Amino acid sequence: MATASVAFKSREDHRKQLELEEARKAGLAPAEVDEDGKEINPHIPQYMSSAPWYLNAERPSLKHQRKWKSDPNYTKSWYDRGAKIFQAEKYRKGACENCGAMTHDAKSCMERPRKKGAKWTNMHIAPDEKVETFELDYDGKRDRWNGYDASTYARVIERYEARDEARRKYLKEQQLKKLEEKNSKNDGEVGEVSDEDEDDDDDALKVDEAKVDESKQMDFAKVEKRVRTTGGGSTGTVRNLRIREDTAKYLLNLDVNSAYYDPKTRSMREDPLPDADPNEKFYEGDNQYRQSGQALEFKQLNIHAWEAFDKGQDIHMQAAPSQAELLFRNYKVIKEKLKSKTKDTIMEKYGNAATEEEIPMELLLGQSERQVEYDRAGRIIKGMETSLPKSKYEEDVFINNHTTVWGSWWKDHQWGYKCCKQTIRNSYCTGAAGIEAAEAATDLMKTNIARKASEDAPAPPAEEKKHVTWGTDVPEDLVLDEKLLTEALKKEDERRREEKDERKRKYNVRWNDEVTAEEMEAYRMKRVHHDDPMKDFLN
């Protein structure tokens, strides 16, 4: 319950307040009313219904829960469609190259591409559109009828009123015509007319006022059923029924990458089994139905209605479908007549060679290299693929004697022409001679690069002859002094003893970096060879 302010209440007042709230929740007491006279839902929790103390609310209200501060930047206005702001007389720099308007560029131009744009002709400059930007609020973004002009419906009302007026006028003329015919008959002939004929005439003169209302006619296709009710209640409508024994569309092919099935509209546009035998398939997708039978005729009828409306005819496919179909039939009849008349005129002027001379059998039984495969039903399986439509940009335009377009050749991260293998755009084609010259220049350049690389290559480094005392093999012509070799062997033994016992090493040690041949030979003689099988018996 919404309370105005928190005031001190006695225990009795608090108990009465709780009882009143329970009665309001049970529907035994009327709901509380706010400042505007609106009832307050008694089931709203207190933490939501009670106003903050700083608002100083005197009466119960829920205004503090509503949005009271609106953003002034938000608006509910809409775009002024089709509005123009300025009509230029000559082309301006930065305008659309196609139509000449300043509010868009040539890529986003909605006008038909001209043969020569306004930039070059400087004629028929299109006016600038009115470009507006709005910052809509939450409701404005979700308003389906935002920007709808109700005055446009007056045209629909006027058209229907004119139709009803013409119908009443026609019926009145028919009644007067039949009354005149009835009065013009002779008295004897009138007496011979049977009573049944008189009744039929009277019924024909009366206006058919027993027509069913259009709102009732709309309910003829409804099938209503009761839903968990005994004597009335809610009803449901059954639509879009199908035979339950049929296999559902989404069960024909369980592959997730097959044709897409939309569960909301129950439609599958593509063929779920494209590789299956066409003679054994009973469903080939919804697109098959749209491109054959009456669907194709209905599409042609719609296109004719649109084109006729653009040319000034007061025709609408949804408002008057019978009128649109009648006009389409008349159009086809007139078109056939005009076509036959044109054919007769040409044949009358130039004659008909087909009837005068027989066509040679070579032309009647002409053959081509194009192979087309058909199935038993006469449908095309393979051979007549649809050609890709060309874009609005220029294609297959050869310039400067080239036989291929720019970008037909690629080499070394560069585009070029395939006919002459040039990578310079807008260059003149040199043909096969240019290719041979380019290959010869390339070979010559590779030869020069290889020759220069061989000349600049550094000379191989000379081998350094290492001294025999530094780890090389002992040459045979080496001559050693026996006395010096004996002294070197003694020094090597002392050095090995010092390595085993560090206490024998003196405090001040002097090292001599100069190694003689005798000292090196002593080191070799005392060195332990790990591959020697008698190494354990040494020393």
Image (cartoon, rainbow, N blue to C red):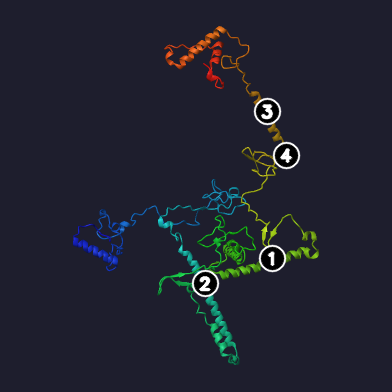
Q: Position of residue 99 (x, y in %)?
A: 57, 51
The amino acid type, in three-letter code, at marker 4 is Ala
Q: Which residue is mark 1?
A: 339
10 Å neighbourhood of mark 3: few (<14), some, or many (≥20)?
few
**Disc 1 versus disc 2: nearer the observer:** 1
Q: Position of residue 512 (x, y in %)?
A: 50, 11
Calculate the distance from the C-alpha at mark 4 to the C-alpha at mark 1: 53 Å
Asked which secondary structure carries label 4, the reply is: helix
Describe residue 42's horizontal placement relative to residue 332 as left or right: left
The amino acid type, in three-letter code, at marker 2 is Ala
Closer to the chain start, of discs 4 and 1, is: 1
The numbered mark at residue 162 is 2
Describe residue 104's horizontal placement relative to residue 19 as left or right: right
The amino acid type, in three-letter code, at marker 1 is Lys
Q: Are marks 3 and 1 in contact (CB under 8 Å)?
A: no
Viewer-proximal residue, 179 or 197? Answer: 197
